Amino acid sequence: MTDSPAPSPAGPHRPDVSGARDAQDAEVLRERAVAALLTARERTTLLTDSVDDHELAAQHSPLMSPLVWDLAHIGNQEELWLLRGVGGREAMRPEIDGLYDAFEHPRATRTSLPLLAPAEARSYAAEVRGRALDVLGSTPLGGRPLLRSAFAFGMIAQHEQQHDETMLITHQLRSGPAALSAPEPPRAAGAATLPAEVLIPGGPFTMGTSTEPWALDNERPAHRREVPAFFLDTAPVTCGAYRAFIEDGGYTERRWWTPEGWAMVRKHELTAPLFWRRESGQWLRRRFGVTEPVPADEPVLHVSWYEADAYARWACRRLPTEAEWEKAARHDPATDRSRRYPWGDGDPAPEHANLGQRHLRPAPAGAYPAGRSPSGAGQLIGDVWEWTSSDFLPYPGFAPFPYREYSEVFFGPGHKVLRGGSFAVDAVACRGTFRNWDLPVRRQIFSGFRTASDA
Ligand SMILES: [Fe+2]
């Protein structure tokens, strides 16, 4: 995904909210929007208060913005969409719009801009938030596409959570002692008895959604998709399995790699996932300021699409297509219905999935038995973003909403789709239909994968 630009509201296909029952639904959505905005702000505050002002304004990696840019950008987008767009209010600080337009300034250049200082950025974001909650409380929902199902508020909560994930990547890239801490994720009871793969029977299923209120344009509309039978790994590929690939010459044998992937390996002299290093015969990794042995049973993290694809070829398998991934995650063969999540239609709870930065690492393969899909595949939601073999393309009937730059300009063969969300994704920005995309070289993101084979 990308940073988002200035608005140009337009808009198709939102479910309508009208009548008494719909008014009740609108009230539920309003409460849900308030809760989602508050949850996002709590996390933003944690991520930005856990380092001092010097670190907040510093560039920790040319790949990332300074954290203070993300903070004010979150406020600026909220002002653009909710105060000016929905509320019709005057611009609070029109002179800063250009500074926080993600399309105008590449990340590596953002420290050279006259950005708001940390205290100013905090008070700007807080003031916008106070006014946005007033707008939410006083604006009737329905009518304009942006207001149906409180969509604009849900979109802004997702936007803030997506930047929180981005800021967590910045935390991972910064050097120095740990600034964040979190409890360990649950262990995987009985993982040893799990089958290595599950069979997904062939046939059509419903992909995407036309009913999820806060689904983004690229998840729409729902459509039928034929998927032949295939096998899918029960869990994401672990560090232990990936280590076997490395030790079998994975990074030294050209035959496992696409030409572009091999060129990347040679150019950057890659020998292992990002943040791994070998010392005295042992694999270590750096994770949020702590160096620790690589855990064999944990899903592998920080691999590019090229590495995932090469591993799959080495293992005599392949990456799943995006449609295969979604069918395995959502399709219930007993009813021929697609669920919102692998476990059903209920929102994610802590027993289902590792989401929301509740833990600062993926859970071991085999954890979260309550979160498995009807096929028996686990950890499809949360833990690690899963690379698929598919390019990021529109669904049949796609219509851009609320602006072309959200998804449409990124469609094409340059971006590969990732599914399922990581431990760093909040539930508001993670669904069975949610689509993420990135360049195939990207490694700093919380990316892993699982493999598939034809049945
Ligand atoms: Fe953004």
Image (cartoon, rainbow, N blue to C red):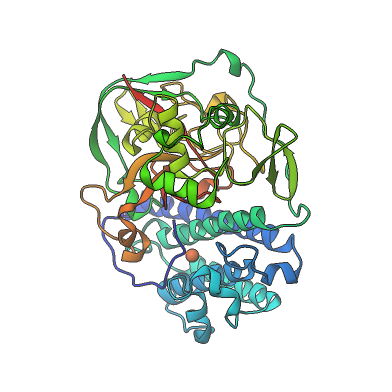
Residue 336, percent from left and from top: 29, 26
Considering the image in quadrants, where does the N terminus appear?
bottom left
Residue sitting at the far right = 177
Considering the image in quadrants, where does the C terminus appear?
top left
Looking at the picture, tell me which residue is in the foreground, 79 or 57: 57
Query: In the picture shown, does residue 281 fall above or below 140?
Result: above
Looking at the picture, tell me which residue is in the foreground, 187 or 417: 417
Residue 432 shows in the view:
no
Residue 143, percent from left and from top: 32, 64
**Left or right placement of residue 16 versus residue 151 in this view:** left
Residue at figure coordinates x 58%, y 57% from the top left: 164
Residue 450, percent from left and from top: 46, 31
Residue at figure coordinates x 21%, y 47% from the top left: 396
Query: In the picture shown, does residue 161 fall above or below 56?
Result: above
Tally of numbered discs = 0
Looking at the picture, tell me which residue is in the foreground, 33 or 70: 70
Residue sitting at the far left = 397
Residue 60, by quadrant, is bottom right
Residue at figure coordinates x 53%, y 16% from the top left: 194
Residue sitting at the far top = 193
Looking at the picture, tell me which residue is in the foreground, 292 or 67: 292
Query: In the picture shown, does residue 105 fall above or below 175?
Result: below
Residue 152 shows in the view:
yes
Residue 146, percent from left and from top: 36, 64
**Left or right placement of residue 84 versus residue 280 in this view:** left
